[in-house]
Amino acid sequence: MEQLSVKHLLGIKELTENDIHLIFKTAESFKQVINRPIKKVPSLRDITIANLFFENSTRTKLSFELAEKRLSADILNFSAAQSSVKKGETLIDTVNNILSMKVDMVVMRHSKPGAPHFLSQKVNARIINAGDGTHEHPTQALLDAFSIKEKLGEINGKKIVIIGDILHSRVALSNIYCLQKCGAEVMVCGPHTLIPKDIHLLGVKVEHNLINALKWCDIANVLRIQLERQDIQYFPSLREYSMLYGLNKEIFKKIDKEIFIMHPGPINRGVEITSDVADSSQSIILQQVENGVAIRMAVIYLLAAQI
Ligand code: CP
């Protein structure tokens, strides 16, 4: 059996191109499984997985949980808000207590960049990063790239623009690494204040004009403004942001070109995207969510194969 080059999924940066293709190939098989009348396989009956969410989540949490259930793993769900973290327990004490219950794998979301990397050096379990602060969100990038491949037939040579709050986005960084490893050209688009100054060093194009960006791309991946991570004001108002960088049907009339629209969620309707675009046939937002389950099944299955 082909194996991943990594023991943990901490970020896309550490993955090889072969790892990404192996995850896609495995996810294609699991996508067939989850579309069958019997959606489960017994592959991970002997594996226990803890889902540790120290930060809020809807899609990622439910998608991992469903992926684990489809693989027949045993699951522990931990949410910091209802835990002894609120009484002052440290991350490492929390995790060691959970691991003493014989857990094989940990899926962790945390607000601090590097938290899953720290954990991988301290505990004897496979770690999957489900989003660490503004750093990486590897399974989101994998499901995004998988959805692009499904829609366009291939990723190599395609042009993808990521629009919005690049500065605070873990989705943007993981997408840049993943799409470039798959041979795509990547552009970022947004106001100067929300684009990191040195981002061109990653080999991405930078564009501040939304129309130019949309004319250039095959697919636009639209990001939410992450107000919860902004301690200062980066633009005058959401209304002005929306006028300059929000996607709506009028803009698509101006560019006269069919492109597909992605969004990792959660959507702020009327800010970065209007409902007539988010819910249109151009949008592949719900296909991304569907593919998330197959991608997470593939990642868990491939990491478990090394235990
Ligand atoms: N895309 C994403 O990470 O969404 P959640 O925060 O709801 O998990």
Image (cartoon, grey):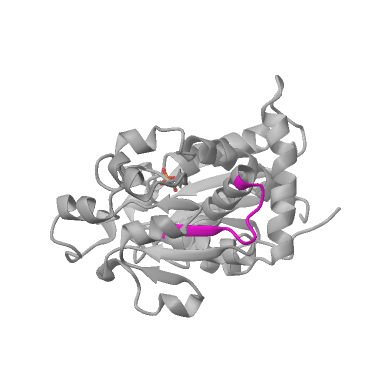
72 or 234: nearer the viewer: 234
| Residue 265 sits above or below residue 128 on the image | above
Q: Residue furthest top?
A: 37
68 within the magenta span: no
Which residue sits at x=70%, y=19%? 37
156 within the magenta span: yes
Compared across the picture, whether 130 is left or right of 299 comes to: left
Which residue sits at x=49%, y=35%? 286
The percent coordinates of residue 303 (x first, y second) are 71, 54
| Residue 259 sits above or below residue 134 on the image | above
The percent coordinates of residue 295 (x first, y second) are 63, 45
Q: Residue furthest left?
A: 236
Q: Residue furthest right?
A: 1
Compared across the picture, whether 277 is left or right of 157 comes to: left
Which residue sits at x=60%, y=63%? 123
Quadrant of residue 10 in the image?
A: bottom right
Q: Can residue 135 be seen here?
A: no
Q: Can residue 79 be seen here?
A: yes
The percent coordinates of residue 133 (x first, y second) are 40, 61
Compared across the picture, whether 106 is left or right of 220 comes to: right
Compared across the picture, whether 221 is left or right of 244 comes to: right
135 or 121: nearer the viewer: 135
176 or 293: nearer the viewer: 176
Quadrant of residue 15 in the image?
A: bottom right
Q: Which residues are magenta?
A: 152-162
The percent coordinates of residue 8 (x first, y second) are 64, 61
Q: Looking at the figure, which quarter contains the C terminus?
A: bottom right
